[in-house]
Image (cartoon, rainbow, N blue to C red):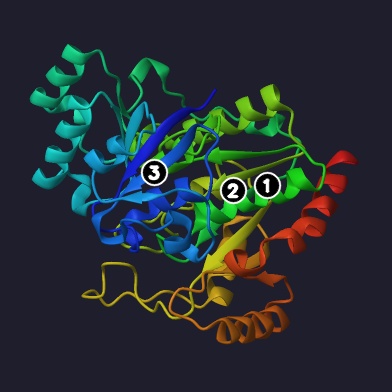
Amino acid sequence: MKSNAIVLTGGLLDTISAKTAHGLIRGTDRFSIVGVVDQKYAGKDAGEVLDGRRREIPVYASLEEFRKGGRAATYCIVGVATKGGVIPDSLRVLLTEALQSGYGIVNGLHEYVSDIPELARLAQEKGLEIIDVRKPKKIKDLHFWSGKIAEVKCPKIAVLGTDCAMGKRTTTRFLVEAMRKAGYKAEMIYTGQTGWMQGAKYGFVFDSTLNDFISGEMEHAVVTCYHEAKPDIIFIEGQSSLRNPSGPAGAEWIVSAAADGVVLQHNPPRKQYKDMEFYPAYIPDPKDEIALIKIYGAPTVALTVNTAKMKTEEARAYAEKYANDLGIPVVLPLEDGVDSLVPVFKSMIEQSKVK
């Protein structure tokens, strides 16, 4: 059974800083989300705040208000990303209240709740669990790249983006769901804390892994998934982007995981990398990024559009233009879903079986 959980967003529910909360609101196989604590949207439905779709997840002004509502929860989940991944004083106060109220803590920030003495002591006194998702594995449990990726015969699709915070994880989950609905065994390799929180079984937290072991952990996750789950297709959640100066990532997805194809996510209005507007580095046109991906060794089989700061008709016009220019499907995942891409992957699966 899934544990009931409430998500803490601290007034940031409608911002990109709450993307962990957004993922959990859209769906999780690990927890049952029974509420969101966000003083700005108290009384609303969290799904309606997120994207206009009611999901029966009420928003409360405080933990006290949630408790008065009579619903039970086992965990409080930190649903926001803070600057530098630190736990600010305002969040410490909320986490203290959560522990005092009998809730365990699930935290995906870089700073660990279990490393804060007063919070760790309080959790121990009350017999409550603290799960710091980004805590790295012990060295003995890490893997070097070995070449075993060659054992994986099903298609491996890397879901990359032209920048961070593009919605890569959401699109990856949508693709898995679409393929399962179409009757295929599809699995997701998570590479971030929210993917784990959403219940993906196979993966690792990319930005908490020592650099020497990233390629090996990527390979190990994919190979383990292939042998245990025996999927028809594997989708790998991307992180950051190939050319983001503050955290270039993507080569391991294509090279170390031997990706058979790439789905590239792009937001046309975004011209510079997130939080780096001060620096003269500009997000490339998708055509140029697709060319770079091809040099790394994988074809881009579809382009998906993040429509933030776009009107729907504008996004559709963009999609039509790029579908013609690039000769690949271009879709709007949030507005239209990704079912139209199923034939692309069906063909790849069929081809993999005759090799």
Q: Residue at x 87, y 39 (%)?
A: 353
Q: Position of residue 261 (x, y in %)?
A: 67, 54
On the image, which quarter does residue 226 sit in? Answer: top right
SS class, disc 2: helix
On the image, which quarter does residue 133 sit in? Answer: top left
User: For the residue carrying disc 3, how many other residues have a C-alpha within 10 Å: few (<14), some (14-19), or many (20+)?
Assistant: many
SS class, disc 1: helix
Mark 1 is on which residue type? Glu
Left or right relative to 239: residue 207: left
Furthest-right residue in view?
354
Mark 3 is on which residue type? Gly
Identify the mark nearer the N-term, 2 or 3. Answer: 3
Position of the N terminus by quadrant: top right
Q: Residue at x 41, y 56 (%)?
A: 240
On the image, which quarter does residue 153 sit in? Answer: top right
Numbered tag placed on residue 177 in the rendering = 1
Name the residue carrying label 3: 35
Q: Position of residue 143 (x, y in %)?
A: 46, 24
Q: Residue at x 82, y 58 (%)?
A: 343
Which one is in front in this view, the residue at disc 2 or the one at disc 3?
A: 3
Identify the mark nearer the N-term, 1 or 3. Answer: 3
Q: Out of 264 and 176, give the one closest to the viewer.
A: 176
| Residue 200 is at least partly visible in this image | yes
| Residue 192 is at least partly visible in this image | no
Name the residue carrying label 2: 173
Asked if marks 2 and 3 touch (Cβ < 8 Å), the reply is no
